[in-house]
């Protein structure tokens, strides 16, 4: 079953998707939850998302986070990998839609043609658009992403802790930080070279994978990450 979250209001779409995940996990505690970033989309990963589960295995709840890259300049060496990853997702739409597992596709600012294609397969579609006059204004937790963009480690550490104390899930904060890392790759920033922003994205992926494998809990990993920026 596919649940699609998209729209021009990036922060609201992300917030609502993670709220949906939190409610689903509270309602069905035996769900096995996983978040797949764009860089993790492979045939094997999507086959597992669609087919895992059964009599002796809990159902899966899989959040596919921002699978479709923004338009890039011609000749960008990173573009081919990301377009390939999004193509893999489109190839698996039928299997994901037919699965008993809950598959959340979080794709803010999704192109209309792709939105229509996925919505046709989705059980539910949630659209969060900003009024045109507000398109360029930032909303949810801008302090967090701005601290990362400006490479202010002390402020980033403080904002992570404020968000955790306020009750935000570590997975949600990680997803927002990784989204911003990809945004830095696509748009550039004074504080980050293109190579540094790519390494930032990879470091966040590795951080999440290590936490999943039983390493340092994600909340503590995020604090350590902030101080390494």
Image: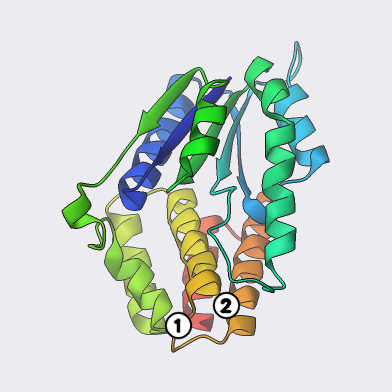
The spot of residue 165 in percent (x, y) is: 30, 56
- Would you place residue 109 above or below residue 56 in this image? below
Q: CA distance from mark 1 to mark 2?
A: 9 Å
Above or below, 123 relative to 66: above
The outermost residue toward the top is 55
Q: Which quadrant is the N terminus positioned in?
A: top right
Q: Which residue is mark 2?
A: 197
- The residue nearer to you, when weighing 99 against 155, is 99
Which image quadrant is residue 176 in? bottom left
Secondary structure beneath disc 1? loop
Q: Residues within 10 Å of mark 1 (few under 14, many from 20)?
A: some
Q: Are marks 1 and 2 in contact (CB under 8 Å)?
A: yes
Kindly state the secondary structure of the residue where label 2 is placed. Answer: helix
**Residue 33, percent across and down?**
59, 35
Name the residue rendered at 50%, 17% in the picture.
Answer: 123
Query: Between disc 1 and disc 2, whose residue precedes?
Result: 1
191 or 18, which lies in front? 191
| Residue picked out by circle 1 | 189
Q: Quadrant of the rendered structure where residue 149 is?
A: bottom left
Asked whether the viewer can see residue 214, the reply is no
**Position of residue 113 measured from the top left corner of the image (x, y, whole percent):** 52, 37
Side of 58 where 106 appears, left or right = left
The reply, left or right, for residue 137 in relation to residue 187 is left
* Image mark count: 2
Q: State whether residue 173 is above or below residue 29.
A: below
What crowding class fits label 2: few (fewer than 14 Cα within 10 Å), some (14-19), or many (20 or more)?
A: many
Residue at 67% x, 46% y is 86
Where residue 155 sits in the image (x, y, percent)?
A: 33, 79
Query: Looking at this view, is 188 or 46 the one in front?
Result: 188
- Residue 90 seen: yes
């Amino acid at each position: 079953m596919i649940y699609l979250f998209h729209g021009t209001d990036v922060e609201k779409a992300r917030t609502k998707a993670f709220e949906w995940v939190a409610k689903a996990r509270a309602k069905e505690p035996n769900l096995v939850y996983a978040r797949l970033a764009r860089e993790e989309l492979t045939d094997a990963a999507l086959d597992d998302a669609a087919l895992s589960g059964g009599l002796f295995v809990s159902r899966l709840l899989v959040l596919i986070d921002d699978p479709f890259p923004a338009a890039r300049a011609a000749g960008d060496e990173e573009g081919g990998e990301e377009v390939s990853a999004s193509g893999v997702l489109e190839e698996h739409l039928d299997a994901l839609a037919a699965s008993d597992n809950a598959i959340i596709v979080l794709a803010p600012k999704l192109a209309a043609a792709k939105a229509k294609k996925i919505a046709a397969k989705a059980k539910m579609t949630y659209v969060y658009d900003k009024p045109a006059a507000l398109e360029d204004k930032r909303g949810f937790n801008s302090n967090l992403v701005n601290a990362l963009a400006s490479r202010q480690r002390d402020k980033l550490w403080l904002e992570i802790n404020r968000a955790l104390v306020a009750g935000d899930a570590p997975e949600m904060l990680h997803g927002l930080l990784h989204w911003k890392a990809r945004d830095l790759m696509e748009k550039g920033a004074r504080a980050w070279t293109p190579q540094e922003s790519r390494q930032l994205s990879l470091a966040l992926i590795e951080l999440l994978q290590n936490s999943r494998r039983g390493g340092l809990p994600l909340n503590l990993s995020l604090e350590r990450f902030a101080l390494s920026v």
